[in-house]
Image (cartoon, helix red, strand yellow):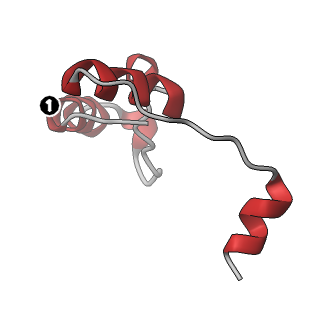
Amino acid sequence: VFVAEDDVGTYTIKAVDDPQTLNKTLYLRPPQNIMSQIELVKIWENLIGKRLEKISISEEEYLASKK
């Protein structure tokens, strides 16, 4: 999830003015800013003008690499 500074400011001001948010935790997750890793990689590939090599590994391989 990516949240722009402008969004943080907007939602913070809205929360300050809303009595329902008094003494509550505010989580900022605007639906337009949710992006998968694949979507992020595609954007990056378009920006750099190259296609990146992608490999898949199993959960076991990933966990073993963290030891």
Tell me what residue is drawn at x 42 percent, y 32 percent.
52
In percent of width and height, residue 50 lies at 30, 24
- In this rendering, would 26 be left or right of 44? right
Q: Quadrant of residue 2?
A: top left
Callout 1 crowding tier (Cα within 10 Å): few <14, some 14–19, many ≥20: few
Observer-nearest residue: 67 or 24?
67
In percent of width and height, residue 56 lies at 69, 41
- In this rendering, would 28 be left or right of 11? right
Query: Secondary structure under badge 1?
Result: helix
In the rendered view, would you say 10 is above or below 31? below
Q: Quadrant of residue 1?
A: top left
In percent of width and height, residue 25 lies at 46, 51
In the rendered view, would you say 40 is above or below 5? above
- In this rendering, would 62 be left or right of 53? right
Tell me what residue is drawn at x 23 percent, y 38 percent.
8
Which image quarter is the C terminus in? bottom right
Q: Which residue is mark 1?
A: 6
Tell me what residue is drawn at x 23 percent, y 29 percent.
7
- In this rendering, would 30 be left or right of 6? right
Observer-nearest residue: 8 or 57?
57
Observer-nearest residue: 43 or 51?
51
Kindly give the residue lying farthest to the right in the view shown. 60
In percent of width and height, residue 29 lies at 44, 33
Tell me what residue is drawn at x 47 percent, y 50 percent.
24
In the rendered view, would you say 8 is above or below 60? above
Count the numbered circles shown.
Answer: 1
Specify the amino acid type for callout 1: Asp
